[in-house]
């Protein structure tokens, strides 16, 4: 029975045919809970990720919980079949943002893409409390992010993410783990870019450039590790954090990563390098555990999340072997 359920999930995820449904009840609930903590999500992506279903998976797993949402891409050139298919969904709901002035979706233009996005959002949507920048291989646990921001002041000139302590004086956030700018930080940056676009470094290395510019504007990096020093924003995938070799992080990060499932906070916010399947697995695990925990009133531990996630992975690996 359980295996059948897993199999179904695998099939669903590999076909990427989950129907796009906004979970209205969830959404309105989360807005009520945090009233003034509105989060605008900016997700950097490319036309390829629309065509292969990655963007839909992001929307269905976590991004539908954002209060404002734009997928940032260069213009999608769609043929007639594609025009009549699921792409319409994104266009109709105004979920796409083509940064004005962006010509090429090249990695070397990443900083440019982000600055042009910030500029455009600054001029049209300056009414949110927090601005999240994520990549299309970032998984964000929106409920934990909301809780984390609950007692933070969006009027403080601050950003939160995975803190690296090299390259930029006073540090920078790993771009892949996603980072959040307070309203104050976002508006200062937007205002400056609007007034003088060359004020901010534009080398192409987005996370470093953005941080260097924020430092020029006296905006500081906040702390996001939990009370036990475990990371909330994680710069690689969940299985890599637990089972992989992350010794490289020692040279970068602010605090030494702990071993195994001690790597990550029970109230983790993000993972990077996540495949669409991993996003679906993790999302399912969290949903099930949340339901159980509210019924039986226990606190969800990261090690339980991981143990369950690992089962999905094992099953996926078994299936892939047989194909
Ligand atoms: C349109 O693009 C899709 C792939 O996204 C392809 O399968 C299809 O054959 C194309 N249709 C036409 C008419 O070119
Ligand atoms: C912010 O402004 C935009 C554009 O006017 C509007 O669509 C959106 O609902 C507003 N959001 C909030 C949180 O006020
Ligand atoms: C824009 O910023 C750059 C870098 O800080 C500076 O050299 C230049 O003078 C500024 N331009 C204006 C018009 O303020
Ligand atoms: C940043 O702080 C320094 C030192 O306090 C100050 O000289 C500088 O004018 C500030 N810059 C901005 C953009 O606020």
Image (cartoon, helix red, strand yellow):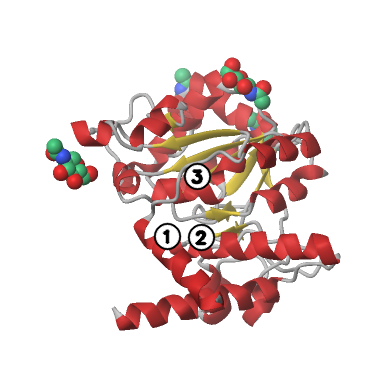
Report the side of 293 relative to 110 (left or right): right
Q: Earlier in the sequence, mark 1 or mark 3?
A: 1
Q: Disc 1 versus disc 3: distance between alpha carbons?
A: 15 Å
Q: Earlier in the sequence, mark 2 or mark 3?
A: 3
Q: Give the structural element (helix, strand or loop) at label 1.
A: helix
Q: Are marks 1 and 2 in contact (CB under 8 Å)?
A: yes
Q: Residues within 10 Å of mark 3 (few under 14, many from 20)?
A: some
Give x and y (percent) for residue 246. 52, 76
Q: How many marks?
A: 3
Residue assigned mark 3: 59
Q: Quadrant of ligand 4?
A: top right
Foreground: 217 or 35? Answer: 35
Residue assigned mark 2: 280
Report the side of 39 relative to 51 (left or right): right
Q: Disc 2 versus disc 3: distance between alpha carbons?
A: 11 Å
Residue assigned mark 1: 12
Q: Residue furthest front?
A: 1
Q: Which mark is residue 189?
A: none
Mark 1 and ligand 1: say if the CB distance to the nearest ligand atom is below 8 Å: no
The quadrant of the image that shows the C terminus is bottom left
Q: Residue at x 48, y 49 (%)?
A: 58
Give x and y (percent) for residue 105. 30, 41
């Amino acid at each position: 029975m359980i295996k059948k359920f897993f199999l179904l999930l695998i099939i669903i995820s590999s076909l990427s045919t989950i129907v796009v449904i906004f979970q209205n009840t969830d959404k309105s609930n989360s807005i009520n809970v945090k009233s003034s903590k509105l989060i605008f999500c900016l997700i950097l992506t490319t036309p390829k990720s629309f065509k292969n279903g990655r963007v839909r998976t992001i929307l269905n797993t976590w991004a539908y919980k954002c209060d404002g949402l734009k997928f940032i891409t260069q213009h999608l050139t769609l043929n007639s079949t594609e025009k009549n298919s699921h792409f319409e969904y994104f266009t109709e709901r105004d979920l796409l943002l083509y940064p004005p002035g962006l010509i090429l979706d090249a990695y070397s233009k990443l900083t440019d893409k982000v600055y042009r996005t910030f500029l455009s959002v600054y001029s049209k949507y300056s009414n949110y409390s927090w601005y999240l920048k994520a990549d299309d291989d970032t998984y964000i646990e929106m409920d934990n992010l909301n809780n984390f921001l609950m007692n933070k002041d969006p009027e403080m000139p601050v950003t939160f993410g995975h803190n690296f302590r090299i390259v930029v004086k006073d540090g920078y956030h790993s771009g892949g783990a996603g980072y959040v700018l307070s309203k104050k930080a976002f508006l200062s940056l937007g205002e400056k870019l609007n007034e003088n676009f060359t004020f901010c470094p534009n080398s192409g290395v987005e996370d470093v450039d953005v941080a260097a510019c924020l430092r020029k504007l006296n905006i500081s990096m906040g702390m996001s590790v939990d009370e036990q020093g475990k990371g909330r924003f994680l710069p690689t995938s969940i299985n890599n954090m637990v089972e992989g070799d992350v010794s490289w992080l020692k040279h970068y990060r602010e605090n030494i990563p702990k071993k195994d499932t001690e790597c990550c906070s029970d109230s983790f916010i993000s993972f990077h390098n996540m495949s669409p399947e991993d996003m679906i697995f993790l999302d399912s695990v969290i949903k099930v555990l949340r339901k159980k925990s509210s019924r039986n009133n226990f606190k969800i531990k990261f090690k339980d999340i991981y143990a369950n996630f690992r089962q999905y992975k094992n099953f996926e690996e078994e299936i892939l072997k047989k194909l």
